[in-house]
Image (cartoon, rainbow, N blue to C red):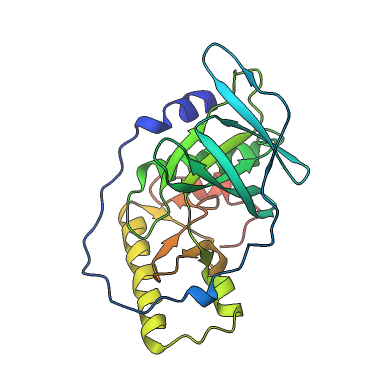
């Protein structure tokens, strides 16, 4: 079942964007973006492996090994957490920079596997200017080697938590614009019958142009199915 979900995710159709009004012109807040210039770039591992269908390159990010399609070239690590390691990369097919999150050992527990497949399926259907865009899912070489997953999304500069902690002075216009975009994204998510359930500053991504995108749908739930709460919400705060 998981294999079918990840193999079919590239052809999914979204709900479509909602036009809630024009963006507000604001000055950039580049000084709030973290300076990652001192973070070492990913180190390519010696050798390259491939099979008849997949061609991949190996990179070492700290102590974590990334095995990616040759389409992507890792640049530098962006962070890590309980759910995976995040790096920036260049998409050599489009020339754009993307974010790649490695989710390790996703089948170690049933709850973790459900969380991953839930987030991937939701992001595959959600299409909105204020929701982070799912670009690609990097498939494993075979079903037997399927233990890690690489999720490719659009790259943003920072998150709202880092901006709040920084010395950048936020004007009333900044705050209003951030609030407007977050509510706009939530309106779209709720119209699709989805509850995010983990909305916090660190899950709101921001770029230097003040554009906001809601991310991390691992805790999200659909509001329609009967019994969903009893089945999945045990042990979680609401």
- The residue lying toward the viewer, choosing from 184 and 1, is 184
Q: Quadrant of residue 50?
A: top right
Residue 101: percent from the left, percent from the top? Answer: 59, 45
Residue 61: percent from the left, percent from the top? Answer: 71, 44
Q: Is residue 74 left or right of residue 64?
A: left
- As drawn, the residue found furthest toward the right would be 63
- As drawn, the residue found furthest toward the top would be 52
Q: Is residue 78 left or right of residue 188?
A: right
Which quadrant holds the C terminus? Answer: bottom right
**Which residue: 26% across, 53% down?**
17
**Which residue: 36% across, 60% down?**
130
- The residue lying toward the viewer, choosing from 12 and 167, is 167
**Count of marks overlaid on the render:** 0
**Which residue: 40% across, 53% down?**
194
Residue 143: percent from the left, percent from the top? Answer: 60, 18
- The residue lying toward the viewer, choosing from 48 and 78, is 48
Q: Is residue 167 above or below residue 126?
A: below
Q: Is residue 115 left or right of residue 207?
A: right
Residue 64: percent from the left, percent from the top? Answer: 74, 41
**Which residue: 70% across, 35% down?**
105
Q: Is residue 213 above or below residue 29?
A: above
Q: Is residue 163 above or below residue 1?
A: below
């Amino acid at each position: 079942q998981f294999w079918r979900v990840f193999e079919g995710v590239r052809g999914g159709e979204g709900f479509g964007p909602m036009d809630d009004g024009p963006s507000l012109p604001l000055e950039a807040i580049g000084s709030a973006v973290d300076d990652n210039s001192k973070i070492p770039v990913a180190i390519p591992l010696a050798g390259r492996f491939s099979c008849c269908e997949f061609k991949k390159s190996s990179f070492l990010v700290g102590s974590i090994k990334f095995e990616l399609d040759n389409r992507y070239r890792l640049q530098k690590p962006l962070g890590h957490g309980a759910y995976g390691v995040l790096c920036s990369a260049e998409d050599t097919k489009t020339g754009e920079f993307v974010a790649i999150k490695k989710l390790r050992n996703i089948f170690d527990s049933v709850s973790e596997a459900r969380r991953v497949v839930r987030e991937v399926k939701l992001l595959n259907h959600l299409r909105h200017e204020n929701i982070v865009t799912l670009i690609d899912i990097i498939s494993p070489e075979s079903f037997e080697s399927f233990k890690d997953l690489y999720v490719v999304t659009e790259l943003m500069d920072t998150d709202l938590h880092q901006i709040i902690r920084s010395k950048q002075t936020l004007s009333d216009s900044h705050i209003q614009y951030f609030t407007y975009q977050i509510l706009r994204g939530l309106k779209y998510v709720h119209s699709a019958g989805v509850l995010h359930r983990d909305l916090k500053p660190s899950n709101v991504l921001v770029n230097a142009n003040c554009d906001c995108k809601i991310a991390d749908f691992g805790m999200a739930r659909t509001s329609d199915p009967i019994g969903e709460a009893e089945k999945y919400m045990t042990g979680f705060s609401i």
